[in-house]
Image (cartoon, rainbow, N blue to C red):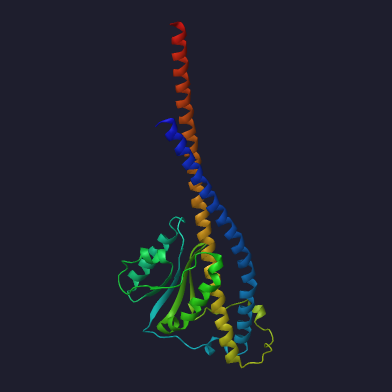
Amino acid sequence: MSGTALRERAALLDELHQIVLAMKNLALSELQRLGRQVEALRPALATVCTALQDVSDAGVGHAAVPSQDRPGGAVGWWVIGAERGFCGAHNSHLAQVVRDLRGADPRTCFWLASRRLQTLLEDLPGAVPVPLAACAAIEEVDDTLDDWWAMLDPVLAACRELWLLYPDESGLVRRRLWPPEPPDRPASLRTAPAPVHYLSLQALTAALTRQLLQLRLRVALMAALTQENHARLAQMQRAQDHLDELGRSLRQRYAQQRQAQITDELETLMSSIDA
């Protein structure tokens, strides 16, 4: 490779390095913003769970929630994947779990919140998974959740159970969304006085349950985005390391080639002097 070609290749590598660095910084920025919002969600979720448990202890409990106990109905999965690329095998792991679930029960229904994940599962046997609005960045969280909430009731009506499937720092999470898992607390706290309220216990339980569903959907989406950005950050770091290694190799080749050219020029010059 000529010196000109080496310089052009070095310029291209430098440009790629800048792009990778920008994507790495973007992932870091999103992780910081997601971390702050996740921290704010935890006390809100704990408060709703505590209030729902207080109402349950008062004598109504989850029986006030419209029952979806349909023994012959299908189990549904609300799967949250990565909408953007450059995050390794993030979606591939989810796709394999979806295939395993469909293989175990051909009646299982899926709602997929990722166009990239939908592409990976185009050949899934049985009923076609239903696409959901996908979320590519933290700025889209509220709009995405609004779209999800608008179609959640028909989904609940079609399933005897609805489960969430999404990645977080511990791996792939499988959490039942409906019927909601009853919030629990230590036995020592279960003798609290009945809560003061201005609605019927049934109406209050239903409202708190819907709030719990909204919060758990938000927590799942934020956790999935967080893990996606962690995966992208790791991928960008590997790409940066690879580009650094290529750059060092290229600079070494250019230095060797330039040294050879200088040596040839000096030998030519000395030969002309001797002549």
Residue drawn at the location 45% of the way across and 30% of the way down: 253
**Residue at figure coordinates x 67%, y 78% from the top left:** 188
Q: Position of residue 193 (x, y in %)?
A: 69, 87
> Which residue occupies 48% across, 38% down?
10
The N terminus lies in which quarter of the figure?
top left
Left or right, 214 with reference to 1: right
Front-most of residues 28 and 190: 28
Corner quadrant of residue 9? top left
Q: Is residue 169 visible?
A: no
Q: Is residue 39 left or right of residue 20?
A: right
Q: Is residue 59 above or below residue 88?
A: below
Residue 85: % across, % down: 45, 58
Q: Who is closer to the viewer here, 26 or 113?
A: 26
Please identify the residue farthest to the top as the structure is shown: 275
Residue 118 visible somewhere in the drawing: yes
Image quarter where the C terminus lies is: top left
Q: Position of residue 247 (x, y in %)?
A: 49, 38
Q: Residue at x 30, y 73 (%)?
A: 126
In the image, taking residue 229 as reference, residue 197 lies left or right, namely right
- Percent position of residue 161, x then y: 44, 79
Q: Residue furthest bottom?
A: 200
Picture quadrant where residue 218 is located: bottom right
Q: Is residue 235 above or below residue 98?
A: above
